[in-house]
Image (cartoon, helix red, strand yellow):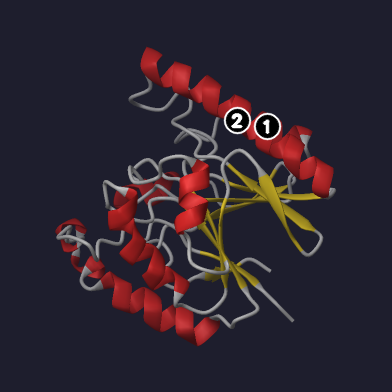
Amino acid sequence: MAHIFAIGDLHLSFSGEKPMDIFGKQWVNHPASIKHHWEQEIHSDDWVLIPGDISWAMKLEQAAVDLEWIGKLPGKKILTRGNHDYWWTTISKVRKTLPDHMFALQNDAMLIGDIAVCGTRGWNCPGSYDFDAHDEQIYMREAGRLRLALENAKKLSSRIWVMLHYPPTNEKHQPSLFLDLMREYQVEHCIYGHLHGEGHRAALLGEFEGIHFHLVSCDFLNFAPKRII
């Protein structure tokens, strides 16, 4: 029986020097830790959701080596974009670059069995400590993109999962358009990343208003993919 796992914020940089250990000793040679846990847990028929911040590369051709590294790991993978994925250009170009059994979502959806997985990047939410007028514009645009993704998912199945890169609420877990939309479309699970270090304390975890929330930043998971179901 296939399982669905999730792990985000891989922050790979095989095409150049971008050491992650400046963020703490837990990041020393972190790709080896990811690979070790991944190969222990995941089989070829399993699925892995990767909600953004995949590669530090600036250009798609530079990111190809990181994507190939992920592609060689067991399982089928679904990617969404993070705020540091500058290499992610048009969705058509990204999809042409991906290895076999890797899929990219951008405001759309795809099926895993009877589960419609949809995704967009998301953004900082109102009430966040540094939220400003510029954030408001992007936040509203990303909320529109999430609705588009959810509409696409609804056409595929009544069981809907959402992949975001950003958390769907602020540090105080106050209402947001992202939460409103997920309630409206009766989303079962929300998988997100972005938070590191002290930011882990602000995570929305477990069941909240009927939705199951999962922070899957790789350092939060100790670099081991989380089995969702």
> Which of 194/82 is in front?
82
How many C-alpha atoms fall within 10 Å of the one at disc 1: few (<14), some, or many (≥20)?
some
Type of amino acid under label 2: Arg
SS assignment at label 1: helix
Q: Where residue 180 appears, x then y in whole percent? A: 68, 29
> Which of 227/59 is in front?
59
Q: Where residue 52 appears, x then y in whole percent? A: 44, 50
Residue 145: give its label. Answer: 2
SS assignment at label 2: helix
Q: Residue at x 80, y 41 (%)?
A: 154
Vertical order, 70 against 51 (above or below): below
Q: Residue at x 41, y 41 (%)?
A: 89
Q: Where residue 161 appears, x then y in whole percent? A: 69, 51
How many C-alpha atoms fall within 10 Å of the one at disc 2: few (<14), some, or many (≥20)?
some
- Does the image show residue 81? yes
Q: Residue at x 50, y 55 (%)?
A: 96
**CA separation in Å, label 2 and label 1:** 5 Å
Quarter of the image for the N terminus: give it: bottom right
Vertical order, 200 against 69 (above or below): above
Does residue 191 appear left or right of residue 208 in this picture? left
- Does the image show residue 176? no
Does residue 64 appear left or right of residue 40 in this picture? left
Type of amino acid under label 1: Leu
Q: Are marks 2 and 1 in contact (CB under 8 Å)?
A: yes
> Which of 208/63 is in front?
63
Residue 148: give its label. Answer: 1
Q: Where residue 11 appears, x then y in whole percent? A: 32, 58
